[in-house]
Amino acid sequence: MLGAEAMRPGLRIAVTFAVWIALFLLPLTVDDWRLTQLAQFVSYGIFAMSLAFVWGQSGLLCFGHAIFFGIGGYAMAVLTKGMLPGWPQGTAFGLCAATLLPGLLALLAGTLMFRGRGLSGAYFAIVTLAAAVIVERSASHWTFIGGFNGLLGIPPLRAGTSELVDALPAYYTLLGFAALVFGLLLWIERSPLGTALRAIRDNETRTAYFGFDVAVYKTLGFAIAGGIAGFAGGLFVTQFGFVSPALIGVPLSTEVLIWTALGGREVLLAAFLGALLVRTVEAALSDLLGYYWLLGLGVLFILTVVLFPSGLLGRALALPLPQRLRPPRERTR
Amino acid sequence: MTQVLILTLDAANFMLALLLVTLGLVIIFGLMNVINMAHGELFLLGAYSVVLVERAGGSYWLALLAAPALLALIGLLIEELVVRHVYHRFIDTILATWGLSLVIKQAVIIAFGPTAQQVSNPLPQPVEILGAVYPAFRLFIMAVSVGVAAGIFFLFYRSRLGLAARAVIANRPMASTLGINTRRMDRMTFALGAALAGLAGAVMAPLMSVDPQMGVGFLIPAFLSILVGGTGSLLGALLGTTLIAGSSSVVSSIWTQIVAQMVVFGLAIVVIRLFPQGLTGARR
């Protein structure tokens, strides 16, 4: 983090603001078709932020994070298509369900996994990987949710009676949600809860000896990330109009890991931009490069992991610590 | 009766094939504390090296020797270029090897195309055992696996090299102060693990459709096996593969293979949760 330390705290905050302003001004420079695509990528970005939160802050490397994204997407699809008679079909209810269902599931899974002599490190990674395989298989054999073919014709976001079908309002709605999620996760990160999570990440045993119930904190962090990932999935399907088992399994879980690692696992905005940038470049180059695109991305991923563990953008976008956590000499009076 | 016999043979066959993959994984994990997510792709490379040798006009038996040798080299290369740099960051070894698995898989797709390749069965005649007709090649696989496993057990528990390796597993700093070159040990371990994966791939190639996705199908059961059995010893790997392969053979004979996979993965997760040290691991 040498680069980050060298930069003055004020400057680093300014960079973060500049990025958000640039994102809000983006529609001035791109056409509608790209904007529609960007709106989808923004929901991927929210997804990446949720992973950065659970992995970068809480130290839980989740290889099945798409499970929550996919459940959110399916919940949104099933509700807004009116497949459950008697249930509300509105956007707001759909998004709530898409957040709460995966969130509660993560809470339950976290309780089961972390309580007592819980799973840690590598075991957690492998168990979530196996879980992603199971969930993907189940989704492609469950005929109610469309099986292997998934569900088509998911309505777009609705505000009141009007549907957000145009590119511009859809983009701004998604970006607004992204900013909201960013604010929420940043607030949690900088709250005492966030401090405890980072303490667990850095040294679980020591944190436990300080009297923190480690399992409860980890479960909470996991549940928050699961809920946000589900929310992102709910938003995504309204933009994409289609949900399939591809959104719930290992491939997407891998992709989100790559975006987050390339951007910067410990910094929310870096992960968000990582998703946006990788997807944008992929959209522009994957036709041209074909199979070589994934090969190059994989090589870049390995290089980043080995040489720049804090990601390619992480240093530039890392925010200064909250005042109360800074060493005394750095405090501004 | 013959039904039961065939089922038992199928289960034993799957278990022994899985054991070949798992042994490589558990050696790398136990000795180096590296979770090798690219192990499935090393298996894949083993299978494709058979395709390569057969295309060049070589026989299957030649490929069976070439595959482990080639993979040992690739293992050395991977250790030197990637794994060496992330030893001290445990989680990053998972990520780096995961990235490697993507790269290898993609390189195979570019070199051979995404479609399945055919490998001829070198022993097409079935044989009759106790009234059941069984493919001879499957029996050959079982023999290879038993032979290799016995060899590995001998190497680890009856040779000086194995003694040194177990010393490194038990206490790495202590072993290095006793004059064991842990750096060389790591290199050899990774090469051996890779060679085992390559051998497994080459052995299984005639039975499976050789396509770029075949690695993952073995990676997850192999990982679950070592976690269920316990990571501390080779016996754990033996127990784990027996349980995973046995139960999935039994369940898939009752329902379908997909149900079997789901049930077995689910059960394995429960076992891992209840016994975080594995079934053979010491209770803490």
Image: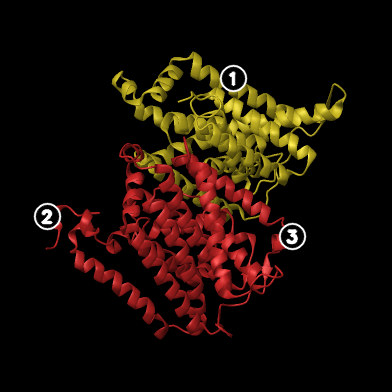
Chain colours: A red, B yellow
Kindly identify which residue carries mark 1: B150
Q: Is residue B233 above or below residue B75?
A: above
The x, y position of residue B201, in whole percent, is 61, 38
For the residue carrying disc 2, how many other residues have a C-alpha within 10 Å: few (<14), some (14-19), or many (20+)? few
Q: Earlier along the polypeptide chain: callout 2 or callout 3?
A: 3
Of the residues tagged 3 and 1, which is closer to the observer?
3
Numbered mark located on residue A329 in the image: 2
> What chain letter is assigned to the residue under label 2?
A
Where the N terminus of chain B falls, by quadrant? top right
Q: Is residue B229 above or below residue B262?
A: above
In which quadrant of the rendered image does the C terminus of chain B lie? top left
Point 64% across, 33% down: residue: B244
Kind of residue indicated by mark 1? Ala
How busy is the neighbourhood of tag 1: few (under 14 within 10 Å), some, or many (20 plus)?
Answer: few
Q: Name the residue under label 3.
A: A143
Q: Is mark 3 on a helix, strand or loop?
A: helix
Q: Splitting the image into 4 quarters, where does residue B170 fall?
A: top left
Q: Could you tell me the amino acid type at mark 2?
A: Arg
Identify the element where label 2 is drawn. Answer: helix
Q: Which sits in the foreground, A63 or A259?
A: A63
A70 versus B279 height, above or below: below
Q: Distance between the residues labelled 2 and 1?
A: 63 Å
Q: Can residue A80 be seen in this view?
A: yes
Residue A217 located left or right of residue B143: left
Real-space CA distance between mark 3 and mark 1, rounded to the nearest whole angstrom: 47 Å
